[in-house]
Amino acid sequence: MRVWAVANQKGGVGKTSSVVSLGGLLAQKGKRVLLVDLDPQGSLTSYFRYDPETITPSVYDLFMHKGQVPADLPAKLVKPAGLDNLSIFPSSTSLATLERNISNQGGMGLVLSRSLAQLWDDFDYVILDTPPLLGVLLINAMAACQRIILPVQTEFMAIKGLERMVSTLKMVMQSRKQALPYLVVPTMFDRRTGASVQAFNELRKTYPDNIWHSAIPIDTRLRDASREGKCISDAYPESRGTSAYNSLLKTMLEAAK
C-alpha cells in the first residue's frame, strides 16, 4: 500500500480536486484506491454525494477509542466513490470538535496509521485529503503517508501560505526523525496572465528541488466534474485537466519506484 497526502495550510488551492483526480486515474488503471477525507468541512465527502452532517460511521469514529482502533471499524467506513476500484473514508462535521474532545489523550497521532494497517491488503493506494490547519488530523496524515503533494495556486498570497506549510512539514520531519518527500504542484495556472507566470517562476526559484516540472491549468471541466460528482478523467477524459493530472501521476509513480 502506498499512502500519499495532499496538504496545504491554505484553503482553495486545489487539494480536493487533486485527490479526486489522482484517485480516479489510479482506479482507471486497475489500482484499488481509497480516498480519505480528514477535513471537517467534508469537501471530498460531499463531492461523492455523501452528507458530512449525517453520515455515520465516519473518520471521526476512528478517534473515539483513546488512540486504539477496534478491529473491523476501518472496514465499516469504506464506501464506494463512483468508479470501480475507488472508495472513500467519509468525513463528518463532528471532526471540528475533535481537538477539544481528545485534548487530554495521548497516542492520538497514529490513529490513521493503525486504521490503514487493518486495510493494508485491501488497497494499493491511499490518498489523504487534509484540513488547512495544523492539528491532530494533519499530524495523523503526515505520520501515515510516505509522500506529500503540496498544491499551491499560482498567485502571491498562496505562495506565502506554502511557506508556512513547508515550515510545518520540516518541523514534523524533525520530530519523527525521518525525511518525508514532498512535491510542490502549481495549480490554477493561467499562462495568459503575467501574475500567474510570475508566481510559477517564483515557485521554481524557491523550491528548485521539490517542484513539479509542470502545472495544473485552470480548466472549467474540473468544476463541471465536481458538479456531476465524477472524476474529471471519467467525465472529461480529453480535457486539459485530465492530461495535466495524468502527467502528475506519472511523476508520482516514477518517484515511488
Image (cartoon, grey):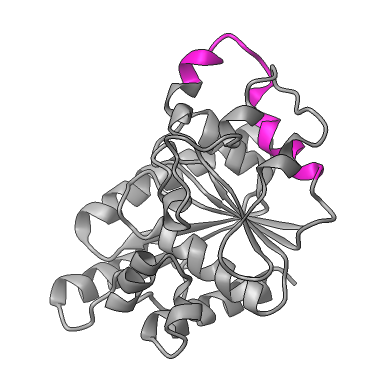
What secondary structure characterizes most of the magenta part?
A: helix
Residue placed farthest to the bottom in the image? 238
Q: Quadrant of residue 118?
A: top right
Residue 88 seen from this side? yes
Quadrant location, the C terminus? bottom right
Residue 64, percent across and down?
Answer: 64, 21
Q: Is residue 171 above or below residue 254?
A: above
Q: What residue appears at the point 38 percent right and 76 percent down from the top-left corner?
A: 215
Residue 210 seen from this side? no
Q: What residue appears at the point 65 percent right and 49 percent down from the top-left corner?
A: 145
Along the line of sight, the residue nearer the viewer: 79 or 4: 79
Along the line of sight, the residue nearer the viewer: 218 or 202: 218
Number of numbered discs overlaid on the protein picture: 0
Drawn side of residue 122 relative to residue 228, left or right = right
Q: What residue appears at the point 69 percent right and 37 percent down from the top-left corner?
A: 177
In the rendered image, residue 114 lying in the magenta stretch gets the answer yes
Q: Quadrant of residue 60?
A: top right
User: Magenta residues, as a range?
Assistant: 99-118
Residue 143, percent across and down?
Answer: 65, 39
Residue 7, percent across and down?
Answer: 47, 50
Quadrant location, the N terminus? bottom right
Drawn side of residue 92 relative to residue 202, left or right = right
Q: What residue appears at the point 45 percent right and 54 percent down from the top-left corner?
A: 49
Q: Is residue 13 above or below residue 29?
A: above
Residue placed farthest to the top in the image? 104
